[in-house]
Amino acid sequence: MSALDVRGLRISFDGTVIVDDVSVTVEPGECVAIVGESGAGKSLTARALLGAAPAGASVALDALTIGDTDATGLAESAWRRLRGRRIALVSQDALAALDPLRRVGAEVAEPLEIHGIARGERPARVRELLERVAMPDAERRARAYPHELSGGLRQRALIASALAAEPDVLVADEATTALDATVQARVLALLREIADSGTGVLFISHDFAAVSRVADRVVVMRHGRIVEQGTVADIFAAPQDDYTRRLIAATRHEVREAGAAGPTLLDAVGVSKTFDRPVLRDATFRVQAGRTLGIVGESGSGKTTLARMLVGVERPDAGALRWTSPQRVQLVHQNPLGAFDPRWRTERSLHEALQAAGVPRAQRSSRAAELMREVGLDPELGRRRPSQLSGGQLQRMAIARALAADPEVLVLDEPVSALDPTVRERVLALLRRLQRERELTMVFVSHDLDVIAAVSDDVLVMRDGEIVEQGPVARVFADPQHPFTIELLAAGRPV
């Protein structure tokens, strides 16, 4: 008997079909991944399987079985009894999913109460669940509030809550997307252990590298339809669909062949910064002309603080950033939607940047159009507001705005972390082309080693505000010396 079996799922809004004829089975002890980019219908499919499709959705299916329960056409009252007990969800944003006013132990205990576990038995059961998900110091963490836990520990608490009623199926919807590489690897290992213990796991992701670490089989979706499915080994070895091939290629980058070493533009010596605590300690490195320096590390490592210092937004408390000559430096932010005025058409933001760069008013419209074409955008898109552009289009627009000042150094802070794999690949290719054509020097900040490999000549590896290793990317990745670099590389590689 399958843990989950759905046949002929169709979801539409106002007559427009969004998910079309999707059929998936998950066996007990198996992890099946549904992979695809934004808009593929993955999360919508997951929510329909939980009887929780959004308002306005019309859901039809030929059959849906969860364990030994026929869930075809269930009323909401029946779904409330089924959710948690037979099928449970682990969502992407644990901080939003967990009640900020309740302690973690109470959050994990709630499904136990709903499903009739006696009050006296709940504390021990909560501790068992937290220990099962490898929560360190489980009793103390149970007394903590969600905001007092790291992202990885919050995700473990959410998984513990989902497992409380021992469901047949655990649906993990982008459950590792927002996590750092080493934390992601640990959560993926936990999901694999849960599957190996007999629970069916449905893993929703856009990341083929994560899928390779956790899943037995993979279902590839595009525009609401299944384009390919099979075992992970078969799909990785011989993908049949061109879209699948592009998704896989976007997660596999060879280390970039380093460019020639140019003159030193910047010497950073003993740079330190403290806010309420030290965030950067004794950073010493150099930036060379025409090359890309990658800065990699996890959340809180000091990457962004260092990037902000390079563009002059922050000043060091100690040490020095010594430019060999005045440089035109521009920053490209991680979140382009937050970097543009939502009330303005994007071309107005380009005009503002060109004005700041001293371009005469009469030349700004033509120059803005040139910049948009240079980054691969139709100038007509400049008439749209930021919310009317896709993530990839908006990031290209942010790069165009940075280029308006004709910079010599471009500092990019996680510029592709929010993009789908194939969109990310196109933006990375754009940056490589711009560097060649404009002879740019780049500093590229990322938590993703695969991205660093694709664009960087040299790399700084940061942890807890310190540079723990640095050197040419090819050498550092081939022969890492610091234990953290070794762990980071192991966590980021497909298995």
Image (cartoon, rainbow, N blue to C red):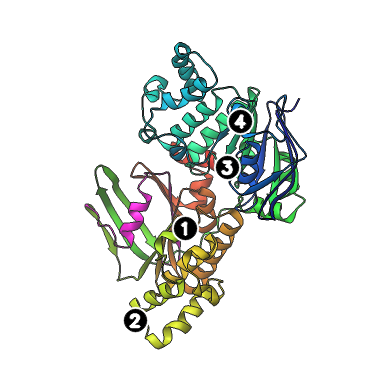
Q: Position of residue 191 (x, y in %)?
A: 58, 31
Q: Is residue 84 visible?
A: yes
Read off the residue under disc 3. Answer: 493
* Magenta stretch, residue numbers: 289-317
Q: Position of residue 277 (x, y in %)?
A: 25, 42
Q: Measuring 62% from the left and 53% from the top, which residue is drawn there?
A: 39
Q: Which element carries disc 3, helix, strand or loop?
A: loop
Q: Crowdedness of circle 2 by 10 Å Cα count: few (<14), some, many (20+)?
A: few
Read off the residue under disc 1. Answer: 415
Q: Crowdedness of circle 4 by 10 Å Cα count: few (<14), some, many (20+)?
A: few
Read off the residue under disc 2. Answer: 358
Q: Nearer the viewer, mark 1 or mark 3?
A: 1
3D distance between C-alphas at marks 4 and 3: 44 Å
Q: Quadrant of the C terminus?
A: top right
Q: Crowdedness of circle 1 by 10 Å Cα count: few (<14), some, many (20+)?
A: many
Read off the residue under disc 4. Answer: 77
User: Three-letter amino acid code at disc 1?
Assistant: Pro
Q: Reading the chain from its start, which is encountered first: label 1 or label 3?
A: 1
